[in-house]
Amino acid sequence: MPDTATAAATQQADTTTLVSTATQATQQQDSTTQAADQRPEYIPEKFWRDGKPDVENLGKSYLSLESRQGRLSNAVFVPDEKATPEERAAYLSKIGALSTVEEYAKIKPENLPEGVEWNDDLAKPLYELAHKHNIPAAAIKEYLDFRVKQEAARNDAINGELNKQLEEGTKILQRDWGSNYGANIKRVEQAAKMVGVDPTTAPGFRDPETLKAILRLSEKLSDDTWSKETAGMQSPGGAAKDIMTNPANPSYQKYQNGDPDTVAHVRSLLAQETK
């Protein structure tokens, strides 16, 4: 069992150790506070570590900021109502927009496919809309090319369906008319031309029942009326040949007798044929 002197010495040593530890902690805290107080104002707090600048992260941040500032120096901002004409022109140039409707109107599709036609009047509203909303010229050109391809595809589909209908109608008429098919088709075409209809483009002429009806109507005309109507549809060369070779033609005999007016008329018809 330790004596009283030894116990007192031990207690004093422990007390001295505790005081020393507390003093060191206080000194360290005071040192940290003093270091924080010494941070220069030009160094942000997030780049101050352990009483000194965090040079590595500070440098990285600076380089990033410098790069961003460089990009912004070449940036063009969207103009507002207070923008100058120069600022507005710079903005339009940067995004590829045009300054007038007339400039947009110069954008047209090239090499239009067969069956697709261009109409400036129909395209004008598009150009006005592009100018109003500052749409890039490249976008308008791409859109027009897209619409042309769409229209060409639509025409191909329509023509394919029309050709299919024509083929089916032809088979029906060949079956029903038999050997008279060729003569009947020619008569139907002549009847259509009498009333000013082009049988090659009129939609109804792909329908076999329509062609049968036209044939029946033409057969109700007298032979004399039919002959007079069809004679008027001859080509100039055909009309001249008919006068020169067809005894039933009222001008045939006059031509054979050398009538000056009739001969001049025939020559005029032949001249028209050669143009």
Image: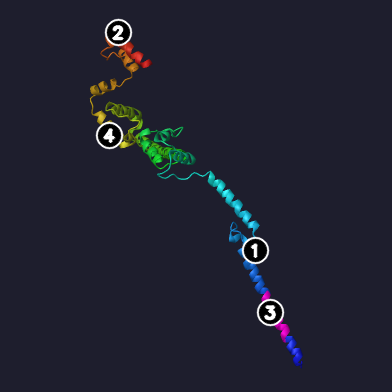
Mark with earlier residue (3, 2): 3
Q: Which residue carries the number 4 mark?
A: 213
Q: Which mark is residue 256?
A: 2
Residue at horizontal 23%, vertical 21%?
Answer: 224
Label 2, residues with CA under 10 Å away: few <14, some 14-19, many ≥20: some
**Looking at the picture, how far across and down is residue 199, in whole percent?**
33, 30
Label 1, residues with CA under 10 Å away: few <14, some 14-19, many ≥20: some
Query: Distance of mark 3 from mark 2, alpha carbons?
Result: 152 Å
Instruction: Judge whether residue 164 can be spotted in this image.
Output: no
Query: Distance of mark 4 from mark 1, alpha carbons?
Result: 107 Å
Which SS class for mark 4?
A: helix
Residue at horizontal 65%, vertical 73%?
Answer: 26
Residue in front for this viewpoint, 62 or 150: 62
Q: Quadrant of residue 89?
A: top left
Query: Distance of mark 2 from mark 4, alpha carbons?
Result: 42 Å
Disc 2 residue type? Gln
Q: Which residue carries the number 3 mark?
A: 19
Q: Please check the rendered image and state whether residue 241 is part of the magenta-colored stretch, yes or no.
A: no
14 sits to left or right of 38 = right
Mark 3 vs mark 4: in front: 3
Image marks 1 and 3: residues in contact by CB distance under 8 Å: no
Image marks 1 and 2: residues in contact by CB distance under 8 Å: no
Q: Which mark is residue 51?
A: 1
**Main secondary structure type of the part rendered in magenta:** helix
Disc 4 residue type? Ala
98 sits to left or right of 73 = left
**Looking at the picture, how far across and down is residue 191, in whole percent?**
28, 28
Mark with earlier residue (4, 1): 1
Image quadrant holding the N terminus, namely: bottom right
Magenta extent: 11-23
